[in-house]
Image: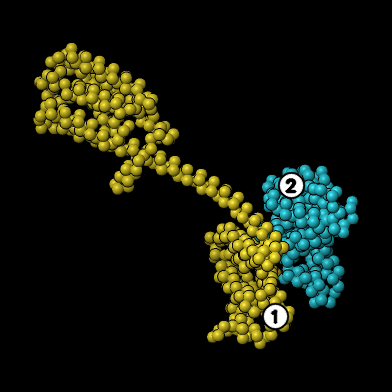
C-alpha cells in the first residue's frame, strides 16, 4: 500500500507523449461508459416515466442528459477540452439531476427503489474529475453527489447509502489506477532518458579518454626535449597514462572470468598494471588465462621483484618484463639494467625480520610448483626467471 | 610542406625520403611531421582516417608510411594489410599508443617493417623511419615479445595437426628473448659472442619468416577452400 501511495504521490506527468496516449484511451472508455449509462437511464425512465409526478420535466431532464453526454464526449475527445471548468459543469449537471429526482419522480415512485433520474450516469462526472484532475477532487465530487441524494431524502434505506459507497469507490478506485499507470509511464520515460544519457556519456568518455591518452603520450614524447623539468613532466605523464589505461582496460579482465569453472584471469592484463615510466611489459598477443590464485601469487612475486629493483638498482634503472607461455608452463622474465648485486646482497636484501628477497621469491614460486632462478653481477643488473606450471 | 626551402641536414636534395603520416589526432601529425622535417625527411601526405590513408598512399606512393593503428574506418592494421597487398615493396612503420597487441601483430604479419610505441622520442622516431626506409626491421621489446608468442602459438597449432610448422632456430629464439628483455643489439652481440650485424640479421630473418608464413598460411587456406569446394562438386 505504501508503495502505491508513494507512486501516486509522485507527481505523475500528464503532458508527455506516453501519458497523452494513455489518457486518450482512458477518456475514450469513459465516453463509452457515459453513453452506455445514458442508454440505461433512458430505459429505466421510459419504463417508469408514465407514473412520474412531472413527466414533462422528466422528458426535459432526459434531453439534458443525452445532450450533455454528446457535448462532453466531443469536448473530452481533445486534450484542450479537459479543463477544470468543463469538469465543474459536468459534476453540476449530475448534482442538479440527482437533487431534483424526488421532485420530478414524486416520492411514491422514487421510494420504490431510490433510483435517481440519471441512475448510474451520475458517476461519470466525478469519475472524469478523478481521472482528469485528481483522485481527491474526484472522491469529493462523488461524495457531493451521494450526500446530495441523502440530504434530499434523509433515510437509512440501504439502497440510498449503497449508491454513495459505490460512487466513492468507483471514482476513487479508477482514479488511483490511472494515476498509478501515469506514474509508471513517467518512471519508464525517465529510465529511457537515463539509459540514453548514459550511452551518450560513455560515448563522450571514450572521446575524452582517447584525447587525454593521446595528450599524455605526446607529453611523454616532447617532455625530455624541454630540459629537466620537461623530463619530470614526461615521467608523470607516462605514469598517468599507464594508470588510466589500466583503469580503462580493467573491465575486460573481469569479463574473461569463466563463470561455470574456477575463476580465471588473464595474466597479461594483470602484469600490464606494472607498466610505468621505468618498467616495460612484453607479452604475446593472445590472452594467458590462469587460475585466479596463480595470477594473484605471480602478481605478488612480480611486485616484490620490481620493488627490489626500485630500492636497489639505482635511480636511472629501467626494468623489462617478458611473459611467455611454453606448453604447460609460463615463463616470467624480469631484467633490469641497474647497478646489479652480489649473491650475498640478494640474500640479505630483505627487510629486517623477513626473508631475503631471493629466498622469498624462490619459496613462493616453489609453492606454485615452479622454479625461480636469479642471475646477478655487479654493474650488470639483475635478471629473474620464473617458470610456473599452469593447467 | 616547404620541401624546396631547406636542404635537410646532410641529406642530399632530391634524394630525401618521402614519408606519409597517418594519425587521427592533428596534434600528432603536427608533432611527428615537424620532427621528421627537422631530421631531413619530406612529408608528402598526411591522413586522419583509413579511407584517406588508402587513397593518398595510392596517389603518393611514399617511401615510408608511418601508420597509427588506432584510426577510424578502416583501422590501421586493416589499411596496412590492404596497402601491402597492393604495394608489397612499401615500407610501413607501425606506431601505437600501447596495449593494442593483436592489432600490432596483425600489421606486422601483413608485412609492416617495424613497430614503435607512440611515446618514443623524436630521435627514436626518425631513426625508426630511416631504418624502415632502408628495409631494416625496427624492433621494440614489446614487438619481440609478440613475435615470440606468435611462433610459440604456431608451433603448438602445428603440433596439433601433426605438422612441422614454422620454427625459430635456437639462436633466433635467444636473440629475440634478449630483445624482449630490453637488451640493445650491442649487448646481445657481446653476450652471444657474435657481431652486431649478425644480431640484426637474426631479427630481420624472424620477421621475414613470420610474414612469409603468413602468406603461406593464406595460400594454404585458399587451396584448402578450393579442394573442399571441388570435393563437394563431385
Locate residue B112, reporting x and y percent. 78, 56
Residue occupied by mark 2? B47
Residue A340's disc is 1
* Left or right of residue B189, residue A369 in this image: left
Do badges 1 and 2 share one subunit?
Answer: no
Locate residue B154, reporting x and y percent. 74, 62
Q: Which chain is disc 1 placed on?
A: A
Locate residue A203, reporting x and y percent. 57, 48
Chain A colour? yellow
Residue plotted at (63% across, 82% down): A358
* Left or right of residue A71, residue A162 in this image: left
Rendering quarter of residue B189: bottom right
In the image, residue A188 above or below residue B189: above
Location of the C terminus of chain A by quadrant is bottom right
Residue plotted at (32% across, 19% down): A70
The chain painted cyan is: B
Locate residue B32, reporting x and y percent. 74, 55
Residue A100 vs residue A120, the one in the foreground: A100
Residue occupying the far top of the picture: A56
Amino acid at each position: 500500500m505504501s508503495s502505491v501511495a508513494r507512486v501516486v504521490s509522485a507527481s505523475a506527468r500528464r503532458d508527455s507523449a506516453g501519458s497523452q496516449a494513455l489518457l486518450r484511451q482512458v477518456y475514450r472508455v469513459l465516453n463509452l461508459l457515459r453513453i452506455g449509462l445514458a442508454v440505461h437511464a433512458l430505459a429505466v425512465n421510459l419504463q417508469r416515466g408514465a407514473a412520474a409526478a412531472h413527466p414533462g420535466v422528466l422528458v426535459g431532464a432526459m434531453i439534458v442528459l443525452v445532450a450533455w453526454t454528446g457535448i462532453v464526449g466531443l469536448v473530452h475527445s481533445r486534450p484542450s477540452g479537459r479543463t477544470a471548468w468543463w469538469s465543474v459543469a459536468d459534476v453540476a449537471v449530475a448534482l442538479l439531476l440527482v437533487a431534483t429526482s424526488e421532485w420530478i419522480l414524486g416520492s411514491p415512485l422514487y421510494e420504490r427503489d431510490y433510483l435517481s433520474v440519471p441512475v448510474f450516469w451520475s458517476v461519470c462526472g466525478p469519475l472524469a474529475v478523478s481521472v482528469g484532475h485528481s483522485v481527491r477532487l474526484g472522491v469529493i465530487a462523488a461524495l457531493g453527489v451521494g450526500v446530495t441524494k441523502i440530504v434530499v431524502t434523509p433515510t437509512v434505506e440501504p439502497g440510498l447509502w449503497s449508491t454513495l459507497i459505490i460512487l466513492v469507490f468507483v471514482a476513487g478506485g479508477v482514479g488511483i489506477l490511472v494515476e498509478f499507470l501515469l506514474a509508471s509511464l513517467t518512471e519508464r520515460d525517465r529510465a529511457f532518458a537515463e539509459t540514453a544519457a548514459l550511452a551518450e556519456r560513455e560515448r563522450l568518455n571514450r572521446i575524452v579518454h582517447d584525447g587525454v591518452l593521446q595528450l599524455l603520450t605526446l607529453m611523454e614524447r616532447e617532455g625530455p626535449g624541454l630540459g629537466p623539468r620537461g623530463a619530470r613532466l614526461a615521467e608523470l605523464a607516462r605514469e598517468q597514462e599507464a594508470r588510466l589505461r589500466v583503469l580503462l582496460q580493467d573491465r575486460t579482465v573481469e569479463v574473461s572470468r569463466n563463470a561455470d569453472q574456477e575463476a580465471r584471469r588473464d595474466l597479461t592484463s594483470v602484469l600490464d598494471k606494472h607498466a610505468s615510466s621505468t618498467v616495460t611489459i612484453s607479452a604475446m598477443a593472445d590472452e594467458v588465462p590462469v587460475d585466479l590464485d596463480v595470477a594473484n601469487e605471480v602478481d605478488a612475486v612480480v611486485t616484490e621483484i620490481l620493488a627490489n629493483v626500485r630500492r636497489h638498482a639505482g635511480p636511472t634503472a629501467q626494468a623489462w618484463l617478458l611473459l611467455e607461455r611454453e606448453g604447460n608452463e609460463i615463463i616470467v622474465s624480469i631484467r633490469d639494467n641497474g647497478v646489479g648485486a652480489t649473491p650475498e646482497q640478494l640474500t640479505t636484501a630483505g627487510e629486517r625480520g623477513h626473508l631475503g628477497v631471493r629466498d622469498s621469491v624462490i619459496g613462493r614460486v616453489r609453492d606454485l610448483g615452479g622454479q625461480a632462478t636469479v642471475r646477478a653481477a655487479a654493474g650488470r643488473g639483475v635478471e629473474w626467471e620464473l617458470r610456473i606450471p599452469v593447467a | 610542406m616547404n620541401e624546396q626551402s631547406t636542404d635537410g641536414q646532410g641529406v642530399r636534395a632530391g634524394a630525401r625520403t618521402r614519408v606519409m603520416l597517418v594519425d587521427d589526432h592533428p596534434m600528432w601529425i603536427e608533432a611527428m611531421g615537424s620532427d621528421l622535417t627537422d631530421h631531413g625527411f619530406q612529408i608528402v601526405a598526411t591522413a586522419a582516417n583509413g579511407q584517406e590513408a588508402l587513397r593518398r598512399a595510392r596517389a603518393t606512393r611514399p617511401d615510408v608510411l608511418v601508420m597509427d593503428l588506432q584510426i577510424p574506418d578502416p583501422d590501421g592494421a586493416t589499411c596496412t594489410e590492404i596497402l601491402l597487398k597492393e604495394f608489397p615493396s612499401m615500407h610501413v612503420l607501425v606506431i601505437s599508443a600501447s596495449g593494442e597487441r593483436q592489432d600490432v601483430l596483425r600489421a606486422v604479419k601483413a608485412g609492416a617493417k617495424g613497430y614503435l610505441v607512440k611515446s618514443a622520442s623524436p630521435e627514436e622516431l626518425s631513426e625508426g623511419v630511416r631504418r624502415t626506409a632502408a628495409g631494416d626491421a625496427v624492433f621494440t621489446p614489446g614487438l619481440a615479445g609478440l613475435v615470440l608468442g606468435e611462433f610459440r602459438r604456431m608451433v603448438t597449432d602445428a603440433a596439433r595437426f601433426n605438422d612441422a610448422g614454422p620454427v625459430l632456430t635456437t639462436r633466433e629464439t635467444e636473440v629475440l628473448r634478449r630483445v624482449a628483455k630490453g637488451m640493445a643489439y650491442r649487448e646481445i652481440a657481446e653476450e652471444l659472442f657474435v657481431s652486431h650485424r649478425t644480431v640484426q640479421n637474426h631479427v630481420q630473418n624472424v620477421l621475414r619468416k613470420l610474414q612469409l608464413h603468413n602468406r603461406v598460411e593464406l595460400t594454404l587456406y585458399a587451396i584448402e577452400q578450393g579442394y573442399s569446394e571441388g570435393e563437394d562438386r563431385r
